Amino acid sequence: MASNVLPFRRLVLLVLCAATLFGCATVKKPLTGLVPGRGISTVQSSVSLSASSGERTSAGRGYLVYQAPDLYHLLILSPFGQTILEAFGESDRFTCVVPSRQIAFTGYLSELPEQSALKSLQLFRWVMAPSPLPLPGPPRQKVDITGTAYYYDEIGMLERKVAPSGDQVRYEGYQSIEGIPFPETVEIRNAAGGEVRIVFDEPQLNAPVDASTLRPELSGMTLYPLSEFKVM
């Protein structure tokens, strides 16, 4: 009888140790080096992108330049580094340029079908807008005067926000950059189910951006309405 007691005690001890280790692994460590009140004015970063809408999906790599509150320029690159596509946005206005064919598609995102994954980019200003401060202690949820719900993790980082319309965005993998908490991954989903996922690679924050970088150069281009752009 006594010979079975010791192995049993060892088993209990191992289970308790494992539970403790796994429990500790789920607790996020606070970010260090954050500077209170410091915000984001510009972002420049290599990115991995994927977009889905219904049964249509696409993915690629590129480079993103963003200037608050709603200007952005996205380059989609081939595996060999050539520019396949350039996208420019300002609020609802959106322009896609295909340099190799000297054509561009321009118009308003709001004019696209609800199922288009590009519609998710209409939310970019909302996605990048600073969130209100979290409430101390659980529940880690806050609703602002517009009805948008904000969800925070246990260390106070914004995990998700959901608009009354059903549009939502999720933030993952925070890191401290220049004293600012910045997510590695942003997932944007519009109410119709179109989704865009952006993964940032070594982002640079608040560096100067040349104004011409954020404006499409359309001279010599053949222009088409944005509704004819069928990539996404």
Image: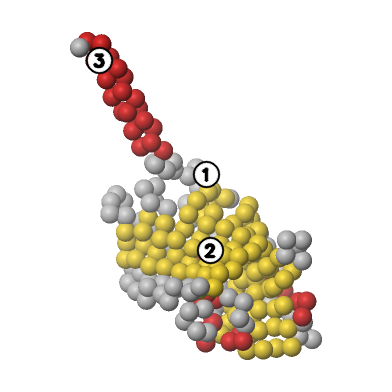
Q: Mark 2 and 3 residues: CB-CB less than 8 Å, in contact? A: no
Looking at the image, is 25 positioned above or below residue 10? below
Q: What residue sits right under mark 3 in the picture?
A: 4
Q: Position of residue 44 (x, y in %)?
A: 64, 61
**Residue 221: quarter of image:** bottom right
From the viewer's perspective, tell me whether residue 26 is left or right of residue 215. left
The kind of residue tagged 2 is Arg
Of labels 2 and 3, the one closer to you: 3
- At x 52%, y 70%, the residue is 52
Q: What residue sits right under mark 2 in the picture?
A: 197
Looking at the image, is 125 positioned above or below residue 95? above
First-in-chain label (1 vs 3): 3
Label 1 sits on a secondary structure element that is: loop
Of labels 1 and 3, the one closer to you: 3
Judge the density around disc 3: few (<14), some (14-19), many (≥20) Cα neighbours within 10 Å.
Answer: few
Foreground residue, 2 or 134?
2
Looking at the image, is 96 positioned above or below residue 38? below
- At x 42%, y 57%, the residue is 158
Q: Position of residue 199 (x, y in %)?
A: 57, 58
First-in-chain label (2 vs 3): 3
Which part of the image, by quadrant, shows the N terminus?
top left
**Residue 18: quarter of image:** top left
Q: What residue sits right under mark 1 in the picture?
A: 33
Q: Position of residue 198 (x, y in %)?
A: 56, 62
Label 2 sits on a secondary structure element that is: strand
- At x 61%, y 81%, the residue is 230
Which part of the image, by quadrant, shows the C terminus?
bottom right
